[in-house]
Image (spheres, rainbow, N blue to C red):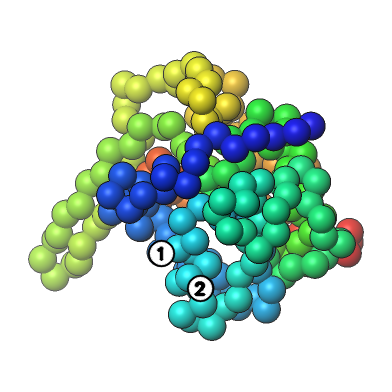
Amino acid sequence: MTYTKQVDNKHYAFETYMTKERWCSVWHQVDEIQKLKPSKILEIGAGTGLFKAVCAVFGHTVETLDIDPDLNPDHVGTVTEMPFPNVSYDVVCAFQVLEHLPYVSALSAFSEMVRVSNRYIILSLPDDKKMLRYKFYIPKVGEYDLLLPHPFKKHRHHQFDGEHYWEINKCGYELDKVIKDFSTCANLTNTYLVRDNPYHRFFIFERDRSSY
């Protein structure tokens, strides 16, 4: 299947794209890499290039793959048919990317990410579940920072908006279903919402060692 870019490089302009919330997500992207300390990293979707640049500051080399040559990726190609041998990279990551594919194609893309990964696969995906954030301080105890689900918000139906084909916790894409579907070819070790940007949910997968 042939895919075409949905936006041009002007979409990633700092003043419109790089919100404070998105900066917080980039921190988590780099933090996950720092924890794993991989030698070879592949990022699906070149985007702003910020993840690659920040990783370089901390000694991590990132290669990028994108269908859009205008974003200056290291490799031009599609995530569903990546031009790499099996187990080419220690970590393969895609941040806010797979929702830009139809759900079945996103699952195929994830399977391809697992194929290319030597061990870890990191995703962030949009989560539509409405959360309420509570921060409070109790003297002599400490500060608490809680995310709680909104008690009156129900799952919405998703309509393609020119970019997102699906989002977690919209009707038909409930979190449990997404976890089950994505876990058929890798083991989920952690998932969490970014407190400062709960629209972004992270997933850390590890490739099944028996499939090495």
The residue located at (24%, 57%) in the rendering is 144
Question: Is residue 115 in view?
Answer: yes
Residue ranking furthest to the left? 139
Look at label 1 and name its amino acid.
Answer: Trp
Q: Which mark is residue 55?
A: 2
Look at label 2 and name its amino acid.
Answer: Cys
Q: Is residue 67 above or below residue 43?
A: above
Which of the 4 image quarters holds residue 65? bottom right
Residue ranking furthest to the bottom? 59
**Where in the figure is residue 193, as x and y percent of width and height?**
43, 48
Taking the image as shown, residue 174 lies to the left or right of residue 198, namely right
Taking the image as shown, residue 35 lies to the left or right of residue 187, namely left
**Where in the figure is residue 167, as x and y percent of width and height?**
52, 31
The residue located at (66%, 46%) in the rendering is 67
Q: Which mark is residue 206?
A: none
Of badges 2 and 1, the one in the foreground is: 2
- Element type at mark 2: helix
Taking the image as shown, residue 191 lies to the left or right of residue 147, namely right
The residue located at (82%, 55%) in the rendering is 83
**Where in the figure is residue 102, as x and y percent of width and height?**
66, 28
Which of the 4 image quarters holds residue 171? top right
**Where in the figure is residue 52, as x and y percent of width and height?**
52, 67
Q: Which mark is residue 27?
A: 1
Which of the 4 image quarters holds residue 80? top right
- Element type at mark 1: helix
Question: Is residue 111 in view?
Answer: no
